[in-house]
Image (cartoon, grey):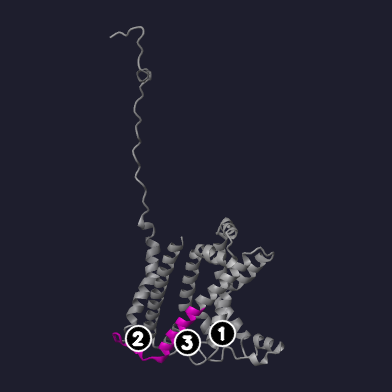
Amino acid sequence: MTLAPHEHLPDHDRMPRTAPAVRAPRQPRARPSWWFAAPALLLFAFVVLVPSARGVYYAFTDWDGLDPDFSFVGLDNFTAMVGDADAQQAVWHTLLIAVSITVLQNGLGLLLALGVNSAIKSRNVLRVFLFAPAVLTPIVTAYLWRNLLGPQGAVNSLLGTVGLDGLRQDWLGNPGLALWALVAVIVWQYAGYSMVIFLAGLQSVPKEIHEAAAIDGAGPVRRFWSVTRPLLAPAFTINLMLSIIGGLKLFDQVYALTGGGPGHATETISTLIYKDAFTLGEFGYSIALAVVLTIIVAVVSTGQYVALFRNERAAS
């Protein structure tokens, strides 16, 4: 076939034909093998899971911790708690301390975070100073405050120096004051820890949002409630979870400060577990108390997490 002089090939016929691109075969994605985690999982099972499972079994026995011969008593240890006034009082004190610490520690931590997040010149020094108690070990803090709050301690001496002798108390020996003195010591130590978490949340809030709200006429309180508070929802979740779980499991400070006394005024489930096991030799009953404490921590923390997570999603 010949073309006339005036005829031209279409443009697509003039372009050189290229071979279609050949796609390289897809390489299968490498999946992590569970065998890498096997040593750690075996160690965790040996150190944590197996002793915990055996402990739950001993909760249904009358084991005294030494005698290899013991009997299976079923639910007797758990039913005995219903009539045990000390156990009921310990549960009440544990819940009261946990709630009080959660409210006071996070309220004070939030106020401190708002203060050191301002433009004051000494804010960096104040951050270090306020966070310093959180790095002390609980035992050191407890012994320090036991001396400060004693009848001849620095607190009473200071009150006497400023002419407030009527306020001098045996802070840890008075059944009506010991529990609240204990709460005050724990809040003093960990308020700075909550402050740091709130401060991280405050510094992540864009300044432009506050400036826009100020231009619209919102005052400081209104800006905090409508702008800052919703954006601090993740910080609230972390702080409240840590506070409530730590308060429910509290042992070190209580035992070092008051030993659960005076009487049973500051007795918690943790201190009662220790006394029943290592003082009275009732290991089966003490382990049953530990199981109850575990259930309380799981139920309270799970319920709190669900509520806070819903609030966090609603605020986002």
Instruction: Say which quarter of the image contains residue 169.
Output: bottom right
Circle 1 residue: 181
Q: Earlier in the sequence, mark 1 or mark 2?
A: 2
| Residue 54, horizontal then vertical, whole percent | 34, 77
Q: Which mark is residue 266?
A: none
Q: Which mark is residue 267?
A: 3
Q: Amino acid at mark 2?
A: Trp
Q: In terms of secondary structure, where does tag 3 sit?
A: loop
Query: What segment carries the magenta color?
Result: 71-100
Q: Nearer the viewer, residue 60 or 171?
A: 171
Residue displayed at 59% across by 88% down: 171
Q: Report how far apart the C-alphas of labels 3 and 1 lie in the structure.
A: 14 Å
Res 166 → quadrant? bottom right
| Residue 91 shown in magenta | yes
Are the residues at dot 2 and dot 3 in contact (C-beta closer than 8 Å)?
Answer: no
Q: Quadrant of residue 19?
A: top left
Type of secondary structure dominating the magenta stretch: helix
Residue kind at label 3, given as amino acid type: Glu
Q: Is residue 100 above or below residue 169?
A: above
Residue 237 lies in the magenta-colored region: no
- Which marked residue is nearer to the observer: mark 1 or mark 2? 1
The numbered mark, 3 or 1, whose residue comes first in the sequence reads 1
Can residue 8 be seen by looking at this rendering? yes
Residue type for callout 1: Ala
Secondary structure, mark 2, is: loop
Q: Secondary structure at mark 1?
A: helix
